[in-house]
Image (spheres, rainbow, N blue to C red):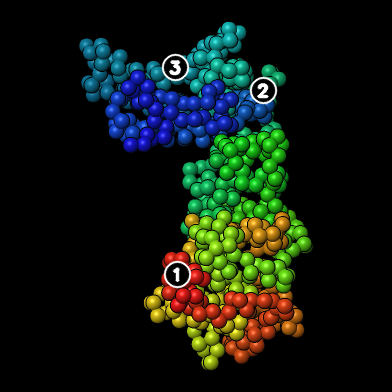
Amino acid sequence: MARVTYLERRNATYYARLDVPLDLVGHYGTTTRKKSLRTKDENEAKKRLWPVIEGWRAEFEEVRARREITSDDKAIAVWQHYEATIDGYDRKQRSMPTPEQMDVELQHIYCQIDKGEITSENFFGMINAYTNYELMLRARTDDANLRARRLNALKSALTAGDAKLIEPAVKKFVAQHRLLVDTGSDEYRELCTLMTRAEIEGLQRTLERDTGDFSGAPKDPIVKPASGRAREAAAPGETIMELFESYFRENPNQIKPDTLAQARRDVGLFVEYVGSTFKVHRIDKKVVREWKALLLQYPVKATETKAFKGMKLAQIVKHNETVKKPTISTTTVNRYLSGFSAFCTWLTNHGYIAANPAADMFLKKTKEKTTKPFAVDEMNALFKSPFFTGCQNDEAPRFWSKPGNVLIRDHRYWVPLIMLYSGARPAEIAQLGVDDVREDCGHWIMHITTEGDGDKSVKTAGSMRVVPVHPELVKLGLLKYHADLRERGEKRLFPLAERNERGQMIATFSRDFPRYLTKIGLKEGRGLSLYSFRHGAADALRRAGFLDEQFGFILGHTSGTMTQRYGTLPQGMLEQRVELVNSISYPGLMIDHLKAADWVGEAALSPYSDCPSPASRSSR
């Protein structure tokens, strides 16, 4: 049986073991935490292990939330303790017995004597009866004596460097403000000295007030009003990530779960910078600006790079000055800001902050297009390559570029072709149901929708649309493929098309396809991808003489113009849509070798296995 991570056995006894995060090694002075679990039984050790590990992790987060003490913190500690000493005196004086209360107590004693409840024969009874009255008479004098004695004790302690008397107040301040001050350190001893001097001044003011002098002011130069502000920790339930979970559950804009999950990671990276206890009302343009500055220097795939293991955002950026990994693009920086900005809008709407500090922080997008359409000669080379004509193996991308007898005829084959002659998005095509492809008024159509069976989604509500099937797709055998799927009782047009763990449809293929283009020499750097077919369809519609606003709806674009708000009929009646889609053409494109082959339909009969080889086809 495999050993549980974090469990270590030494001399037959089990120990909990956890690596200290790199950013905390300096604080702990070690790279590893270890603790005996006091058992030699592995099963019992596993039971005892996780509370220890979780305790350490919570401790790590607590230490991360702490920070180095500053001169402002010291000034605040001094002034707060001075004021607290005087405030404590004032509260105590207000609670002291008044002459009226003492007279009432004395009259009560006399009444007990008159009733015979207190007699001279009961000596102890008389003492007890007068005790409360005597305490009330001496309350102010006793309190003054106690303060005078503490004042003298603090002066002696200050001279001797003894911190015992002031330590409770010092530890309380350090804990409240989450300061990184270790007991016994130089910073700790200095803070003890400063707060001792503050209390000495405060006690002196109280003794002056005992005589009716309220005009006294601190004589020690360090005891003065603090100009800075101490950092406060977020209240329980109101940390940034706790509020994000409320935003996540509410999802006011009906954002896709995958996009929300990405936003959680984006906001988490912000919290990594400001700290887990950062109060939400302090999120302002300054801190967002500082975070953005780090994002601009953030390396690509930092969390997956061994060189940055265990590091936080600022540390990664600093270390990358040595490692020199490429940094994320402007688009990616804007994506981080977008998820964070949407959350800030929710915070604003709910009164946690006054305005969205990320609203105007976005970087200007480059006007240069990163995706370009295929040239005709590039498409001719692509459609004659092994991926479309026969490869060595269809299970791994590394075999796609090697000629062989295995034909790829699942979604990986059809999605590029359907994109070429429709301009639809790859995910929209891959999720089509068999019933989404049907005949309507004499025309075959693809219904891109979230309706029907299956896990479907569209980019926006305006992306739901009807797209006619192009005649070239009919010649390529799409309808035959569709008929075979229907005959087999399949519900989905492409049964093998899958979503990744983030819910993105055929994301793996979308990632592997550009790599294949590079492998066969069509791509170098950025430019060509699966989306190049969509761009090509748009250019084909322009070549046919249509304006962007005339065919945008076919591609699933929405412009949101005022005209669209009038009437109820959908844009582009079916005949007009057919005219638009049928106008898509690519002069010089040669794909006849993919058309009307007798094996196209038969290949669809087994979408879960390899398609028949050319040799087996010729023997039939």
- Figure quadrant of residue 218: top right
| Residue 607 numbered tag | 1
Rendered location of residue 155, percent (x, y): 59, 11
Residue 105 in view = no
Rendered location of residue 78, percent (x, y): 62, 24
Residue pictured at 64% horizontal, 25% vertical: 74
Q: Which amino acid does label 3 sit on?
A: Arg
- Marks 2 and 1: in contact by CB < 8 Å? no
Is the C terminus in the top left, top right, bottom left or bottom right quadrant? Answer: bottom left
Disc 1, SS: loop
- Figure quadrant of residue 221: top right
Mark-to-mark CA distance, 2 and 3: 32 Å
Disc 2, SS: loop
| Residue 138 numbered tag | 3
Mark-to-mark CA distance, 1 and 2: 82 Å
Rendered location of residue 589, percent (x, y): 69, 76
